[in-house]
Image (cartoon, grey):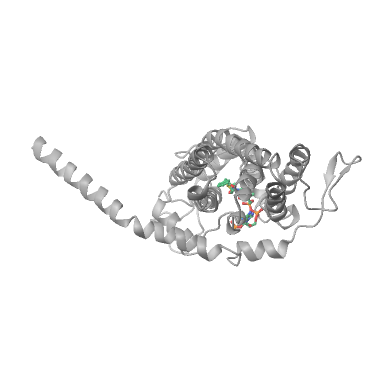
Amino acid sequence: MYTQSFNVPDADAPSGAPLKAVPHDTALQAHFDAVIDADGKIEPRDWMPEAYRKTLVRQISQHAHSEIVGMLPEGNWISRAPSLKRKAILVAKVQDEGGHGLYLYSAAETLGTSRDQMFDALHSGKAKYSSIFNYPTLTWADVGVVGWLVDGAAIMNQIPLCRCSFGPYARAMIRVCKEESFHQRQGFESLMTMMQGTAEQKAMVQDAVNRWWWKCLAMFGPPDADSPNSVQGMRWGIKRISNDDLRQKFVDATVPQAEVLGVTLPDPELKWNEARGHHDYGQIDWDEFWAVVNGDGPCNRERLATRVKARNDGAWVREAALAHARKQQQRAMKEAA
Ligand code: FAQ
């Protein structure tokens, strides 16, 4: 008998008889392991261990939710962008994030989970999304800083995901990374313009950097020693670089950019360490991070309420589309009869 576990007794076996190992099981597992070891790709129709499938659904759906919830902090500024050019760029960027969410939901659907199940998990507070989107965008400079630092951190994390062992996720990431890189540059360029402006504009940029810097460092997830999913994720070729190593790469890449921009990163302990060949940096507030991840950040409730309202407000569109599809199908069947 075929089941997901491949390990049930035969129907004609006497009850209480020991489970018969099904030879297929080990062969499939061995094939999966060989593909992973050879750095190959697992595709949706391939056999995969249930734990691998579950991990991917967890990570990809959380990633998709982050993109969709991530539209909100910047979307908040579309109606107040300071010029037509900035408004057009921001509309395009926020739309791109929505598109990333859709690629990712589609990738997760190939693993046998429905979009409704994923939305239910988000809306009931069961699924996570990135901590960073639970902070408010208080000024126009925050929009530039989200592009520069939040998209910058997202790219750092996502480039290794282009080599993820699960094909649909890896392929989605290639396109996402190209778009994120435009997002990061537009953020930097917007801040650069402000830094050539008035003293008030420069102060606004510095204030935004002060408020977002530490939250961006926390985006990479808990320290490696406290990251329960890392070891298995790396064994499976889902994660390629650890949370702490990505965080370090982000710090090292951002310090020279901050110098070009003319802003100070708000960390007195930030300094080049010649022996390590990296920048040292100060302590991240992990209590704050976990409070935000567990639903208690400045904007968690507002963000979820906005997503639930959007889902409810759109119900009539989904119903109308389904009714239209049913009508078309009936008409086609009548014509064929
Ligand atoms: N926020 O054992 P680990 C973007 C959770 S997209 C909330 O280290 P893992 C684009 C983690 O889920 C940003 N929760 O977990 C954009 C786990 O809980 P669970 C999103 C977090 O999976 C820009 C627990 O902590 N990017 O920004 C966070 O090995 C601008 C233990 O952690 C992705 O999702 C966090 N920051 O590593 C959009 C990339 N960190 O699930 C709009 C894909 C950790 O066991 C505007 N995801 N947790 O209940 C990943 O690479 C990984 O899932 C990590 C976490 C690195 C996030």
Q: Position of residue 134 (x, y in %)?
A: 58, 59
- Front position in the image: 20 or 218: 218
Residue 309, by quadrant, is: bottom left
| Residue 53 appears in view | no
Against 228, is 332 above or below? Answer: above
Q: Is residue 305 left or right of residue 135?
A: left
Residue at x-position 60% and y-position 67%: 296
Residue 330: percent from left, percent from top: 14, 44
Quadrant assignment for the C terminus: top left
Q: Nearer the viewer, residue 205 or 219?
A: 205
Q: Position of residue 194 (x, y in %)?
A: 66, 42
- Height in image: 144 above or below 298? above
* Residue 110: quadrant of the picture: top left
Considering every residue shown, the one lying at the far front of the view is 198
Is there any visible trace of residue 295 in the rendered image?
A: yes
- Residue 127 appears at what percent x and percent y? 52, 59
Count the labels in the image. Answer: 0
Tell me: 48 left or right of 270. Answer: left
Q: What residue do we see at 62% from left, 50% from top? A: 142
Q: Is residue 336 above or below residue 235?
A: above
